[in-house]
C-alpha cells in the first residue's frame, strides 16, 4: 500500500507527531527525495533542541548523501541561522524544528539555495509524491559515488552578519530581559548580544525541547506573563520573547505591556527606509495595522499589501526587490537576509532605535501604534462560505464601504476595517478588526461576530504563528 503523507506535508513544511506520524526511516527517504527534486549536489542541515531532532536530521543527511549530495551539518541552530547558512553558502537547506508545537512534534522547513522557500507549489508536493511512489516501488539504491557528511559551526558568522546590518556601537546602555522559552534563542542570543552595551537578563535559556516552563509561542498572551513580570521587577528597558526555533520575536515595553508586531513592522520599516535613502518597497500582509502603510509612505517608501503567509510575503519580496516585509505574527523579512525572516534582526533594530534616543520604549512605539485592534478572533463555523456571505451582505451596501477578496473578505470604511478569512485546515473563520478608537472597534467586532456565530459556533482569540 502506498504511504499517505497528506497529514504531515503541510503548505509550507513537514510537521507531525514523532514517531506516530513520521520517524527516522521516513526522514531518510525525505532527504533522498529533497536531493532528487532540487537536483542538489550539496545541502546544509540544522536542527533545534527537540529530543527527536538529532536523529531525524541525521537520517535525512544519510538519505541525501546516498543520492550523491555532500552534506554540511551545522548542528543546533535557530531557523534563521539555517537560512543564513543557506544564503551565505549558496546551498539548499533543511531545518528540523516544529517551532512552537508541543514536544512530541517535529518537522522540516526546507529551502533552496539562497534561502528561497520550498512550499507546496515550489517542490514540497513533488517531494511528497516521490516518497509516496517509493513506498510502492521501493526507494532507489545508493548512487555510485555517495556524498560526504561534514560538520561546520556557523553561529559566529551568523551573529557577525546580523550585527553588520544594524549599528549598535553608539547606543546607550540598555537592560534587556530575554525569554527564550527553552528554545533556540538560548543558543543564539548569548553570541549575538556578546559585546553589545546590553545588561542581559536571561530567562529559560536552557535548551529543553519538552518546554518545561511554558509553550514557546510568544503570541499567546499566557506565555508572556513571566517575561512581563520580570521586566517590571528588574526595571528593564524592554523584554524580548522568542519562539521555539527563534525565528519570531515578540517585544514587551518597560511597563510590561506587549507591543503589537504591526508597530514593530512600522518601526523597522522606517529604519530600513532610512538605510536605503528613503526609498524602497515594504511588504505587509493585509491584516497588519493601517499604521504600517502610513509609516512607509511618510518615510518615502512604497507599501505593497499581500495575503497572509510567509510564502506570499517572500514571493512579493522577490518580485518587488523589497527591502523589508512584516506580518502580524511577528515574522520579519529582510532583503539583506536573502528575503528570509529573522526575529533576531528585528530585535536588534528595536535595540538600536531605543538606545539611540533617551525616552522609554512605550513612548517610542506610540508613533507607530495608531489604531485600536481586536487581535485575531477564531470562530468555529460549519458553513464558512454562508457566514461570510451573510457578513458581506450586511456591510457591502453601506455608504463609504468597500470590499475586496484578496484573502478572505476585507471590508473597509473611513474609520475602520475588518478581515474575515477561513482557515485552510480547520472549520474556523478568523476575524481581525481595526478602528480609530476602541469603542468603534468593539462595535464593529461585535456586529461581525453576531453574524458569524450561532449557538453552536463558539470562538476564542487564537494567536497565529508558524
Image (cartoon, rainbow, N blue to C red):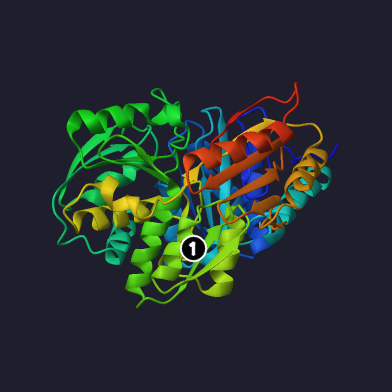
Q: Quick one: label 1, few (<14), some, or many (20+) residues within 10 Å?
A: many
Where in the figure is residue 78, as x and y percent of width and height? Answer: 41, 47
Q: Secondary structure at mark 1?
A: helix
Q: Nearer the viewer, residue 358 or 441?
A: 441
Q: Nearer the viewer, residue 437 or 99?
A: 437
State whether residue 224 is above or below residue 273. above
- Tell me which residue sits at (76%, 43%) in the image: 388
Relative to residue 9, is residue 296 drawn left or right? Answer: left
Where in the figure is residue 180, as x and y percent of width and height? Answer: 35, 36
Relative to residue 446, is residue 46 drawn left or right? Answer: left
Q: Quadrant of residue 214?
A: top left
Find the residue positioned furthest to the front: 399
- Tell me which residue sits at (45%, 42%) in the image: 245
Per the image, the residue denoted by label 1 is 293
Q: Nearer the viewer, residue 223 or 81?
A: 223
State whether residue 186 is above or below residue 370. above
Q: Is residue 120 visible?
A: yes
- Tell me which residue sits at (42%, 29%) in the image: 223
Find the residue positioned furthest to the right: 1
**Quadrant that contains the C terminus:** top right
- Tell me which residue sits at (37%, 65%) in the image: 270
Where in the figure is residue 69, as x and y percent of width and height? Answer: 57, 60
Where in the figure is residue 220, as x and y percent of width and height? Answer: 48, 32
Amino acid at each position: 500500500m502506498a504511504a499517505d503523507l497528506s497529514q504531515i506535508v503541510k503548505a509550507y513544511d513537514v510537521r507531525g507527531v514523532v514517531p506516530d506520524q513520521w520517524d527516522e526511516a521516513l526522514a531518510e527517504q525525505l532527504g533522498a527525495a529533497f536531493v532528487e527534486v532540487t537536483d542538489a549536489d550539496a545541502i546544509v542541515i540544522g536542527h533545534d533542541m527537540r529530543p527527536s531532532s538529532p536523529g531525524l536530521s541525521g537520517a535525512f543527511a544519510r538519505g541525501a548523501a546516498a543520492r550523491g549530495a555532500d552534506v554540511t551539518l551545522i548542528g543546533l541552530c535557530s531557523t534563521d541561522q539555517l537560512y543564513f547558512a543557506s544564503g551565505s553558502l549558496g546551498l539548499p537547506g533543511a531545518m528540523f524544528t516544529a517551532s512552537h508545537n508541543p514536544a512530541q512534534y517535529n518537522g522540516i522547513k526546507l529551502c533552496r539555495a539562497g534561502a528561497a522557500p520550498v512550499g507546496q507549489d515550489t517542490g514540497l508536493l513533488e517531494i511528497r509524491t516521490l516518497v509516496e511512489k517509493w513506498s510502492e516501488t521501493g526507494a532507489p539504491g545508493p548512487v555510485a559515488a555517495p556524498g560526504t557528511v561534514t560538520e561546520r559551526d556557523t553561529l559566529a558568522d551568523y551573529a557577525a552578519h546580523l550585527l553588520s546590518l544594524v549599528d549598535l556601537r553608539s547606543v546607550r546602555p540598555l537592560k534587556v530581559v530575554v525569554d527564550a522559552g527553552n528554545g533556540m534563542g538560548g543558543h543564539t542570543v548569548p553570541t549575538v548580544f556578546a559585546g553589545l552595551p546590553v545588561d542581559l537578563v536571561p530567562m529559560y535559556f536552557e535548551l529543553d525541547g519538552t518546554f518545561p516552563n511554558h509553550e514557546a509561542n510568544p503570541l499567546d498572551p499566557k506565555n508572556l506573563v513571566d517575561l512581563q513580570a520580570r521586566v517590571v521587577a528588574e526595571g528593564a528597558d524592554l523584554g524580548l520573547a522568542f519562539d521555539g526555533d527563534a525565528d519570531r520575536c515578540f517585544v514587551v515595553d518597560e511597563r510590561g505591556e506587549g507591543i503589537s508586531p504591526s508597530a514593530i513592522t512600522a518601526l523597522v520599516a522606517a529604519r530600513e527606509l532610512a538605510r536605503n535613502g528613503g526609498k524602497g518597497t515594504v511588504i505587509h500582509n493585509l491584516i497588519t495595522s493601517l499604521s504600517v502603510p502610513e509609516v512607509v509612505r511618510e518615510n518615502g517608501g512604497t507599501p505593497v499589501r499581500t495575503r497572509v503567509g510567509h510564502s506570499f510575503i517572500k514571493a512579493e519580496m522577490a518580485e518587488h526587490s523589497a527591502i523589508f516585509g512584516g506580518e502580524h505574527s511577528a515574522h520579519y523579512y529582510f532583503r539583506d537576509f536573502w528575503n528570509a525572516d529573522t526575529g533576531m534582526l528585528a530585535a536588534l533594530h528595536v535595540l538600536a532605535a531605543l538606545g539611540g534616543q533617551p525616552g522609554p520604549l512605550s513612548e517610542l512605539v506610540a508613533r507607530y501604534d495608531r489604531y485600536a485592534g481586536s487581535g485575531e478572533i477564531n470562530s468555529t463555523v460549519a458553513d464558512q462560505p454562508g457566514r461570510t456571505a451573510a457578513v458581506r451582505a450586511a456591510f457591502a451596501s453601506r455608504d463609504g464601504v468597500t470590499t475586496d477578496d484578496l484573502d478572505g473578505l476585507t471590508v473597509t470604511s473611513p474609520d475602520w476595517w475588518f478581515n474575515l478569512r477561513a482557515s485552510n485546515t480547520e472549520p474556523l473563520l478568523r476575524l481581525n478588526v481595526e478602528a480609530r478608537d476602541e469603542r468603534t472597534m468593539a462595535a464593529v467586532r461585535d456586529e461581525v461576530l453576531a453574524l458569524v456565530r450561532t449557538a453552536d459556533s463558539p470562538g476564542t482569540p487564537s494567536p497565529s504563528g508558524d
